[in-house]
């Protein structure tokens, strides 16, 4: 990962997988991680951060669902090309806003399921 550092604050109300996801999304969106760049394996990043492999795997799954990374057998996990029409700045702003929202919701005592359902409901209401 060419010197890009991911850190997890275990005292934060934001779950570790979300911290990893948000940091990697931001690194991708601002171009610090470039298209085709290889990410550490789930096991390696988990060991580096002192976390369970499942925590890192969840972050990677969410990044893959967002089309920010691709995992291919034998080729590892790499940064995906940005979707057409999406600018790096747009993704960075989305990641920042999402991180702020999640931190706010968790500070109010809402759980992960509540936060995810609120986002899904808001998207449905807007017809997306």
Image (cartoon, rainbow, N blue to C red):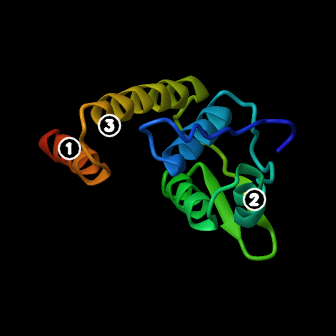
For marks 3 and 2, give the CA distance. Answer: 26 Å
In the image as oriented, which residue stretches furthest toward the left? 125
Q: Indicate the quadrant containing the N terminus: top left, top right, bottom left or bottom right.
A: top right
- Figure check: 25 above or below 96: below
Q: Position of residue 7 (x, y in %)?
A: 67, 38
Q: Residue at x 74, y 76 (%)?
A: 73
**Element type at mark 2:** helix
Viewer-side label of 1, 2: 2
Residue tagged 1: 118
Q: Residue 82 is drawn in which quadrant?
A: top right
Closer to the camera, 12 or 99? Answer: 12
Q: Can you tell which mark lies on residue 106?
A: 3
**Element type at mark 3:** helix
Residue tagged 2: 47
- Figure check: 33 above or below 75: above
Q: Residue at x 48, y 35 (%)?
A: 12
- Figure check: 119 above or below 96: below
> In the displayed structure, does residue 41 sit left or right of residue 62?
right
């Amino acid at each position: 990962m060419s010197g890009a550092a991911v850190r997890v604050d275990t005292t934060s109300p934001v779950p570790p997988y979300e911290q990893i996801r948000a940091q990697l999304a931001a690194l991708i969106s601002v171009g610090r991680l470039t298209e085709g760049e290889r990410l550490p394996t789930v096991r390696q990043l988990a060991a580096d951060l002192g976390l369970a492999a499942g925590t890192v795997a969840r972050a990677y799954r969410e990044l893959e669902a967002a089309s920010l990374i691709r995992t291919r057998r034998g080729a590892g996990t790499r940064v995906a090309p940005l979707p057409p029409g999406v600018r790096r700045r747009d993704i960075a702003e989305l990641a920042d806003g999402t991180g702020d929202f999640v931190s706010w919701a968790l500070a109010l005592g809402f759980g992960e399921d509540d936060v995810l359902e609120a986002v899904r409901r808001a998207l449905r209401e807007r017809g997306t």
